[in-house]
């Protein structure tokens, strides 16, 4: 396999896409328990007024996140904050589908300049978490 003309950060995140998607999903569910969205099952109270189901679910989510590599969770936190209809959001969505290089550029419908800008951004966040 030749890596001529490839971008290692893109290739690495495309390879890690399943784990990143799982982290983003867990973080989103954790947010919903914190009141960012309304969880229908979280408003039920048990005897004594405790929100036991919600507390149990929160503990389960935190445990699942603790089982993920910490650097992967940090990168997922950065990736999930962009709107899907923006150029950066389309770039991230392609990465999370396992795409990189020209396949990613085509799928995200980005110009060469936009790809370079996104690659610099990606290098900055991946590089900062890999070196730590």
Image (spheres, grey):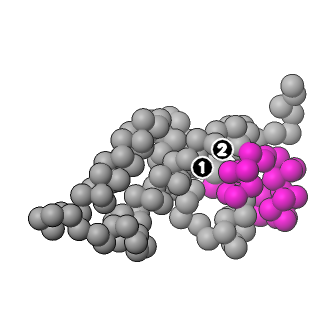
Quick check: can you spot residue 92? yes
x, y percentage for residue 95? 71, 50
The chief SS type of the magenta part is helix
Q: Residue at x 62, y 71 (%)?
A: 83
Secondary structure, mark 2, is helix
Q: Residue at x 72, y 64 (%)?
A: 90
Eyeballing the image, is 48 above or below 57? below
Please name the residue that numbered disc 2 is placed on.
17
x, y percentage for residue 19? 58, 41
Eyeballing the image, is 20 above or below 4? below
Q: Residue at x 86, y 50 (%)?
A: 103
Please name the residue that numbered disc 1 is placed on.
21
Residue 95: give its label: none
Can you tell which quarter of the image residue 51 is in?
bottom left
Query: What's the CA distance linking mark 1 and mark 2?
Result: 6 Å
Quick check: can you spot residue 120? no
Answer left or right for 15 relative to 112. Answer: left
Q: Which residues are the magenta region?
A: 92-121
Can you tell which quarter of the image residue 112 is in?
bottom right
Q: Does the segment drawn in magenta span residue 103?
A: yes
x, y percentage for residue 75? 53, 48
The reply to whether dot 1 and dot 2 touch (C-beta < 8 Å) is yes
Q: Is disc 2 surrounded by few (<14), some (14 to 19) or many (20+) residues within 10 Å? A: many
Secondary structure, mark 1, is helix
In the image, 117 versus 87, the foreground residue is 87
Can you tell which quarter of the image residue 29 is in?
bottom left
Q: Residue at x 83, y 31 (%)?
A: 3
Answer left or right for 117 relative to 63. Answer: right
Q: Does the segment drawn in magenta span residue 47?
A: no
């Amino acid at each position: 396999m030749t890596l001529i003309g490839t971008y290692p950060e893109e290739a690495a995140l495309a390879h890690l896409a399943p784990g990143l998607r799982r982290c983003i999903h867990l973080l989103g569910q954790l947010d919903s328990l914190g009141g960012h969205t309304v969880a229908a099952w979280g408003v039920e109270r048990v005897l004594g007024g405790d929100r036991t189901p919600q507390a149990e679910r929160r503990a389960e989510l935190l445990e699942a996140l603790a089982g993920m590599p910490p650097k992967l969770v940090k990168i997922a936190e950065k990736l999930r904050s962009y709107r899907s209809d923006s150029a950066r959001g389309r770039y991230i969505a392609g990465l999370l589908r396992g795409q990189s290089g020209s396949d990613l550029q085509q799928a995200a419908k980005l110009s060469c300049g936009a790809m370079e800008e996104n690659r610099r951004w990606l290098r900055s966040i991946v590089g900062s978490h890999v070196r730590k």
